[in-house]
Each structure stands twice: as C-alpha cells, then as structure tokens.
Amino acid sequence: MTRDEILDPTALPRRTVLAGAIAAGGAALATAASAAETPGVLAGKVAIVTGGTSGIGAVTAAALARAGAKVAFNGRREALGREVEARIRREGGDVAYTRADVRDAAQMERFVAGTLARWGRLDIAFNNAGIDLPPAPIADTDIAGFDDQVATNLRGVFVAMKYELPHLARAKGAMINMASIGGRHAFPNIVAYGATKAAVIHMTRAAAQEYGREVRINALAPGAIETPMLERVRRDWQVTTEQLVAPYPMRRAGTPEEVAAVVVFLASDAASYVSGHVIGIDGGDLT
Ligand code: NAP
C-alpha cells in the first residue's frame, strides 16, 4: 500500500485502510518519510542529538547525517551508541558517539566542547533524551522517580541548551527540543512526565524570545511513536496501540522516521521563519 493510497480521501473506508498500514508496521509510511528527505539540505552543518542510542534519537541522527550534517550524539548505553554509530557510518554518514549522561552537567559540557573541538561549529541541536516511568497516581508516585524525570527530561534539556546556545548563536543555528503530547494535555497518572514536558515547552518559548535574532528554537510534541518507550508504555499501562491512538483521527501510531523528517525540516533553511512553536506530530490529535 502506498502513502498516496492511504491518504486518498476517496479510498474508503479509511479506517480499514489505516488498519492495514498499522498491520504493516507503518513500513510504507516510514519509507515515504525517508524519501521526503532532501540529500544535502544540511550539508556543511554540525548537529548534536541527545539520546541517540535508541528510538527517535537514533533514527533522527541517521536522517540528519543523510541530509548532509555531521552528527554528534550521546546516550548512556555505550554498546548501543557504538552500534548506531557504526550503522550510520556504513550509510556514509559522518557521526560520533559520546557516552554522556544529560543529568551530569560536567559530562554534557565536555560532550558539547568535544563536538566543537572535532568539527569547529554547531548549527543544529536536537535535545531529545528523555525517560518515562510506570504510571501511578500522585499519592503513589515515587519521589526518586519524580526527581529522575525532572533531572533527565527538564534539567537535562536545560543543561544541553546552556552549553549549546552560545555556539548555535554564532552559527545562527536551530534548536529543537523534545516535549510530548503529554506536555500539552494533562493526562492522569504521569504527573512528573507531563510536568517536565510542559516545562520543556515553556523553556523553548522563553529561549526563542531570548535568542530570537540568532537561533530558531522550536519544540516537538509527538503523540504515540513506535519506539522502545512505546513498548514500555504498552507493558506498564497494559494498553494496546489501538487504545492509545483511539483519540487520534489517523488512528495509528507514528514512526520515528516521521519525527525525524520534522526535525530535518526545522533544522533546515526551509523553516527559516519558524521559531517559538510547538509542533504536534500526533496524527491530528484532537483531545
Ligand atoms: P527511547 O527509545 O527510550 O529513547 C530514549 C533515549 O534517551 C535513549 O537514547 C536514551 O539513551 C536517552 N536517555 C535517557 N536518559 C538519558 C540520560 N540520562 N542521558 C543521556 N541520554 C539519555 O524512547 P523514544 O521514544 O525514542 O524517546 C525519545 C524522546 O521522545 C523522549 O524525550 C520521549 O519523552 C519523547 N517522546 C516519545 C514519544 C513516544 O511515543 N515514543 C512520544 C512523545 C515524546 P540511554 O538509555 O542510552 O542513555
């Protein structure tokens, strides 16, 4: 099934068609998203991706490299980081993995400085690293778990922004921060996750005001995206994908490639007048 067939408004019943796409694992759409990338659109640029060892970060690091950027990414799991690095190099990408924890400011300062030492500039930063924890009502929410989400999803993005922004300002670059649909809507039982993602949206808007003349700064608010995190959500929440995506008009989960395509767009000159926004990547969610 082609993407055009899926999106064809005359191809009814749409839900049956989309169910086919879901059954196919979204593979057709993932291919279409990759095909939409323009090779060379980021030629000569240097990018940082936080949390590139898995999921959206790993796929986006590869997409940025295919678009011509040199890509530095981090994550704590070194073996996975080396695998992703090798895969992108096999595709011809210029990429470097660094083991760095976004909760550790000194490690992040060294990661950013190392990127500058290696490639001399920074044009693009995708601050993506984040964690989720099993859902619980507030009274049962573990304080250490709350603190870890704040340290990773919120303070980790702040720390990355702090060290990246002076270099991005020099290059008149672009920053993309990872929020979530959970930062736009108040969902029960994930108060820490939702609060950290809402705070990322606020930091993004504030930073876009502060750096308006030099850096374009936007946030992403994806809905359910098919990654290891979504696997954990299905397991911990005891829900199916169909239940999770029931509020979305498209009635399917997104793919990491569909997020990566938006990052490449926001990082490119095609988005030269787009800043301070939160971009939903959520199948048209209306909740
Ligand atoms: P994932 O596959 O679990 O990837 C998370 C990434 O974050 C991994 O590379 C992980 O690397 C990294 N990370 C976590 N803690 C870190 C730390 N302390 N220091 C450095 N890196 C760290 O999940 P994903 O779905 O791709 O999630 C990526 C981002 O998208 C997250 O911010 C998530 O909240 C957001 N998001 C996801 C969805 C979805 O449905 N999947 C929806 C909305 C938003 P290591 O474990 O190797 O450190």
Image (cartoon, helix red, strand yellow):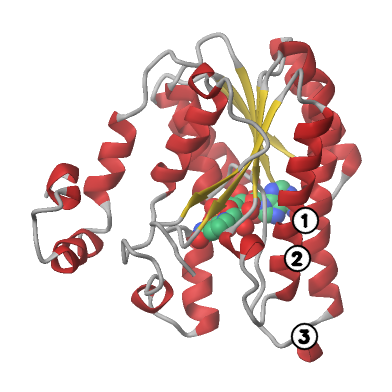
Residue indicated by mark 1: 199
Q: Which mark is residue 195?
A: 2
For the residues labelled 2 and 1, the Cα–Cα distance comes to: 6 Å
Question: With 33 as the anchor, is 89 left or right in this view?
Answer: right
Q: In the image, is residue 186 above or below residue 282?
A: below
**Which residue sits at x=83%, y=57%?**
151
* Label 1 – label 3 distance at C-alpha: 18 Å
Foreground residue among 129 and 262? 262
Q: Distance of mark 2 from mark 3, alpha carbons?
A: 12 Å
Q: Position of residue 177 (x, y in %)?
A: 67, 42
Q: Amino acid at mark 1?
A: Ala
Query: Which image quarter: residue 117?
Result: top right
Discs 2, 1 touching: Cβ within 8 Å: yes
Classify residue 109 as left or right of residue 117: right
Q: Which residue is mark 3?
A: 138
Q: Position of residue 276 (x, y in %)?
A: 68, 37
Local SS, label 3? helix
